[in-house]
Image (cartoon, grey):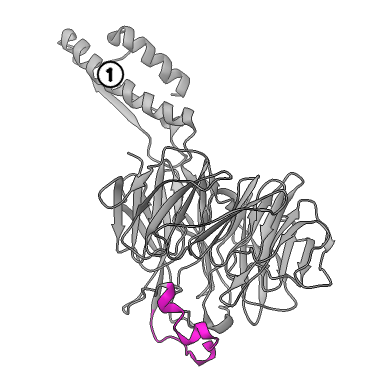
C-alpha cells in the first residue's frame, strides 16, 4: 500500500471506521522505509460478534494510527535526512540539511542512548536508514589512544618514529551495526585477525578509516592491515581485497577514509614506499583503475568526490601535491605541486570552489581556493604562491587536524580551539574567535542547516550560527575523549568516544 492509498484509508476510517476494514486488517507502510529494513505495521483485530465493540476499538486504535502516520508523514515532509553514508556525510561535503537536533545536551539531557564496549577506533559512525555502521579494533591488550597533549610528548611526535618497533599484539578488526533508534547491537562481523606490521602514533587507532555505504552494501577499509571488504547491510561478507600495509611517516599509522560514487569505491593508500589511488567496483571488488604518485608521501587526508557546477572530480591530497581525477576513468584532470597541501585534514568544497591547505605543529600554511574547471599542471614557480585557476591565497590560514567546511559564501577553518571565518569569494578574514570551554578540535566540523557543530577533544561541544557574526546558539558535553567526527542523521547527533557511541536527540 502506497502513501496515497494509506492517506485515503485514513480519511475514510476517520469518517466511518467499520466501512473500510475486514475483520483483521494490517496496514503496511512499507513505502516509508528504506529498502531492506523492517516495515511499519498498524494491525487491528475486529470482533464479528460485537460490532459496537469494533467501532469503539477501531476508533481508538485508529486514532493512534493516525497520530503515528502523521508523525512519519510529517518527518517525510520536513525532509529529515536519515542518511550519513561516509566520512563527513553525503559526498564528503560536511553538510546536512536542517533538522530538529537538540540545542543543549549532556548525560542527563537529550541522551537517547549510549552503546559501550564498541572497541577502539577514530572512524566516524555512518548511518543508512535506521542502521548505524562502525568499524573497530579489539585486542587482549589495551588499545585506548592518548589525547593530544599526552600524544605530543611521545618520541614519534618529535620526529623519532624510527625508534618505534612493530607492535607485539593480536588485533581483531570488526564491523558493527547498531539500531539508530535504540543503540541496540544488531550484528558484528569480523574482517581479519593478525599482528600489525607497523606501529601507530599513541594518539591514533587501528581503525581510524571511516567506512562508506550505499543502498545495498557497506564498504570498510583498515589501512593497518591493508584489508578492504564489502558487506550486506545484514553483515554478510560479499568480497574482500588485500593490499600491502604501508609504512607511514614517523610510524604515525594510517587514517584515510574511503570515498564512493555511482558504485565505485575509492581507496587512498599513501605511504612512505608507495602512494596509490585505487578504484574498485563496489559490486565485485574488482580493480577498475589505479593511479600512483611518482614521489610517495604519507597522507592521512581522505579523498573526496567534488560535484561542482562543471563536472565530478575525485580530489586527493598529501605532502606538497593536490590532484584531481576523472572518477570513472582515473584520468588526471589537473594537479598542483609545490604547495603545502592537506595531509592530516581533508579538502572542503562547494559548487564553485575547493578550499585546502596544510599546517603542522611547527607552521601554519596558506589557505587556497581553486575554481571548478581547472586543467593541466598548475604548479606555481614559487612555493605556496597563486597559480592558474587559484581564486585566492590567504597566508597563515590553513587548518590543522580538523577539516574546513564551506557554506558557499563563507569558509570555516578550525585550528586547535580557534574558529576562523573567511569569505569564499575573496579569502578575506571575517572573524577569528576562541571556542569557549574547548581546548582542541580534532574532529571535523559538520554543518547542520545554518548551524556549525564543533566537538572538542575533551568532550565539550558547541553550535555556532553561520553568518558573519560569531554567535554560539547551543552546545553540549560528553564525558569522554573525542577525535572521531560526529555524524548527524534523523535529528540525532552521534558522537564516538574511546569505547562508546552517544546518541543525542531524536525524541
**In the displayed structure image, the side of residue 362 where residue 133 appears, left or right:** left
Residue 167 magenta: yes
Quadrant position of residue 146: bottom left
Quadrant position of residue 477: bottom left
Residue 24 in the image, given as x and y percentages of width and height? 27, 20
Most foreground residue, 131 or 210 = 210
Instruction: Quarter of the image for the N terminus: give it.
Output: top left
Q: Which residue is mark 1?
A: 63
Query: Measuring 55% from the left and 84% from the top, which residue is drawn there?
Result: 250
Most foreground residue, 312 or 394 = 394
**In the displayed structure image, the side of residue 312 where residue 196 appears, left or right:** left
Instruction: Quarter of the image for the C terminus: give it.
Output: top left
- Which region is colored magenta? 148-170
- Is disc 1 placed on a helix, strand or loop? helix
491 versus 274 height, above or below: above
Quadrant position of residue 377: bottom right
Residue 67 magenta: no
The residue carrying pointer 1 sits among few (fewer than 14), some (14 to 19) or many (20 or more) residues within 10 Å by Cα, namely: some
Amino acid at each position: 500500500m502506497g502513501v496515497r492509498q494509506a492517506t485515503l484509508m485514513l480519511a475514510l476510517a476517520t469518517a466511518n471506521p467499520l466501512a473500510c476494514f475486514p475483520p483483521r486488517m494490517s496496514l503496511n507502510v512499507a513505502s516509508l522505509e528504506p529498502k531492506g529494513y523492517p516495515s511499519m505495521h498498524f494491525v487491528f483485530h475486529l470482533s464479528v460478534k460485537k460490532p459496537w465493540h469494533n467501532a469503539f476499538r477501531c476508533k481508538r486504535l485508529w486514532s493512534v494510527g493516525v497520530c503515528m502516520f502523521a508523525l512519519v508523514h510529517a518527518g517525510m515532509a520536513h525532509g529529515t535526512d536519515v542518511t550519513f553514508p561516509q566520512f563527513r556525510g553525503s559526498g564528503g561535503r560536511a553538510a546536512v540539511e536542517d533538522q530538529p537536533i537538540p540545542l543543549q545536551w549532556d548525560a542527563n539531557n537529550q541522551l537517547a542512548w549510549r552503546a559501550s564496549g564498541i572497541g577502539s577506533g577514530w572512524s566516524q559512525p555512518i548511518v543508512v536508514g535506521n542502521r548505524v555502521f562502525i568499524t573497530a579494533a579489539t585486542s587482549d591488550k589495551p588499545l585506548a589512544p592518548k589525547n593530544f597533549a599526552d600524544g605530543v610528548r611521545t618520541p614519534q611526535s618529535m620526529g623519532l618514529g624510527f625508534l618505534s618497533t612493530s607492535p607485539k599484539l593480536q588485533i581483531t578488526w570488526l564491523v558493527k551495526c547498531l539500531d539508530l533508534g535504540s543503540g541496540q547491537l544488531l550484528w558484528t562481523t569480523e574482517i581479519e585477525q593478525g599482528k600489525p606490521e607497523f606501529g601507530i602514533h599513541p594518539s591514533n587507532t587501528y581503525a581510524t578509516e571511516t567506512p562508506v555505504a550505499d543502498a545495498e552494501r557497506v564498504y570498510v577499509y583498515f589501512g593497518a592491515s591493508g584489508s578492504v571488504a564489502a558487506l550486506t547491510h545484514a553483515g554478510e561478507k560479499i568480497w574482500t581485497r588485500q593490499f600491502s600495509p604501508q609504512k607511514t611517516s614517523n610510524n604515525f599509522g594510517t587514517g584515510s577514509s574511503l570515498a564512493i560514487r555511482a558504485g565505485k569505491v575509492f581507496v587512498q593508500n599513501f605511504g612512505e614506499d608507495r602512494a596509490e589511488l585505487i578504484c574498485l567496483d563496489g559490486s565485485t571488488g574488482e580493480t577498475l583503475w589505479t593511479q600512483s604518485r611518482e614521489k610517495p608521501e604519507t597522507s592521512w587526508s581522505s579523498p573526496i568526490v567534488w560535484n561542482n557546477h562543471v563536472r565530478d572530480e575525485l580530489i586527493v591530497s598529501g605532502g606538497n601535491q593536490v590532484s584531481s581525477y576523472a572518477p570513472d576513468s582515473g584520468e588526471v584532470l589537473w594537479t598542483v605541486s609545490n604547495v603545502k597541501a592537506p595531509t592530516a585534514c581533508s579538502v572542503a568544497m562547494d559548487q564553485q570552489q575547493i578550499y585546502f591547505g596544510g599546517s603542522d605543529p611547527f607552521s601554519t600554511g596558506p589557505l587556497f581556493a581553486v575554481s571548478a574547471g581547472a586543467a593541466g599542471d598548475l604548479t606555481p614557480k614559487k612555493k605556496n604562491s597563486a597559480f592558474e585557476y587559484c581564486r585566492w591565497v590567504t597566508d597563515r590560514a590553513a587548518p590543522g587536524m580538523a577539516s574546513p567546511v564551506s557554506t558557499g559564501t563563507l569558509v570555516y577553518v578550525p585550528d586547535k580551539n580557534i574558529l576562523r571565518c573567511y569569505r569564499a569569494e575573496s579569502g578575506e578574514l571575517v572573524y577569528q574567535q576562541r571556542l569557549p570551554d574547548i581546548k582542541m578540535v580534532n574532529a571535523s566540523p559538520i554543518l547542520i542547516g545554518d548551524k556549525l557543530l564543533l566537538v572538542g577533544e575533551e568532550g565539550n561541544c558547541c553550535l555556532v550560527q553561520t553568518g558573519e557574526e560569531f554567535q554560539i546558539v547551543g552546545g553540549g558535553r560528553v564525558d569522554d575523549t573525542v577525535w572521531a567526527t560526529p555524524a548527524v542523521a534523523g535529528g540525532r547527533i552521534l558522537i564516538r568516544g574511546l569505547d562508546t557511541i552517544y546518541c543525542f536527540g531524536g525524541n
